[in-house]
Amino acid sequence: MADPTETRPTGVVRRDTPPGTTEDGSRANRRTSRYGEDVVQAIGGDRYPLCDEGSYFVATNATPGTAIAGIAAADGYDDTEALLYLANTHATKHVYLDYVHLICEAAGTNGSDFAYAIDVATEATYASGGTAITPVDTNRETDNTAPVTMYFGAVVTTTGTTEKIMSHGQLRTVIKVIGDHYLLSFGDGPLPPATTIMEATAQASVQKSCPPIIVPPSHALCIRDFCASQSVAAQWQFEMGFWVR
């Protein structure tokens, strides 16, 4: 009788080498567990394989606990003003948005009807302002560098070409409150409603469903916040998660 292992598909375990490459440097067309099982879905949650291969990144305030001020007179949508600017500088890879979490540390002055808009454009370049942010790889073993240019705060940008508004919405009908949390989640479908009504004066935890958004090479993403009649900037701590592949 023929040995059944002669026709059994074989695979490799991959840990610190690029996908499709074995530990000894040879090429492989399949990815398997150590038991020879095909790996065809996420292990331990859909973000962990991305973390494991060094593709998942998180960006936060340059100094934890130190808030960053946004645009002072952001009193309406303006495609040259942004709270967050992220440009994909890689020649071939794409940036996939996961979430953005904003914590209000100072509410600003006179700003009601707090809203946001997210757009992606070619040739939308950083001009001035804001704080340079260096995202970090969440796998300490790989320690990769994100191929992005990123600023957060009172950011001034140039107007891009082929600009597309990917998402927009209202977060508060009144002025922000210190301690407010705003979570923008990308590609996860509908989220539960806010725990506090939008016109309340107590702290709110607001969650917003956004579509899946991909930033291709040579494109820039801008998250823009604006409030009616705002005259003094709000201040923020933030966290953003994304992966690059």
Image (cartoon, rainbow, N blue to C red):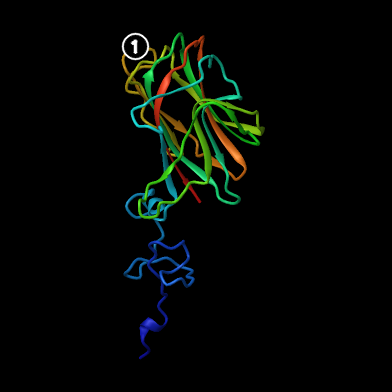
Report whether 124 appears left or right of 226.
Answer: right
Residue 151 rendering spot, x and y as whole percentages: 51, 32
In the picture shown, does residue 50 fall above or below 129?
Answer: below
Report whether 203 appears left or right of 94.
Answer: left
Q: Which residue is mark 1?
A: 201
> Number of labelled discs?
1
Q: Single out the residue that lies furthest toward the bottom.
A: 1
In the picture shown, does residue 240 fall above or below 44?
Answer: above
Q: Amino acid at mark 1?
A: Thr
Residue 83 rendering spot, x and y as whole percentages: 50, 26
Residue 209 rendering spot, x and y as whole percentages: 44, 32
Residue at image location 38% in from the left, 62% down from the top: 15
Is the residue marked by circle 1 packed among few (<14), some (14-19), or many (20+) residues within 10 Å? some
Question: Residue 3, located in which quarter of the rendered image?
Answer: bottom left
Question: Residue 235, located in which quarter of the rendered image?
Answer: top left
- Is there any visible trace of residue 190 in the rendered image? no
Question: Residue 10, located in which quarter of the rendered image?
Answer: bottom left
Q: Nearer the viewer, residue 100 or 206?
A: 100
In the picture shown, does residue 138 fall above or below 13?
Answer: above
Residue at image location 38% in from the left, 17% down from the top: 106
Specify the quadrant that holds the N terminus: bottom left
- Is there any visible trace of residue 99 in the rendered image? yes
Dot 1: element = loop
In the picture shown, does residue 166 fall above or below 215?
Answer: above
Residue 225 rendering spot, x and y as whole percentages: 50, 22
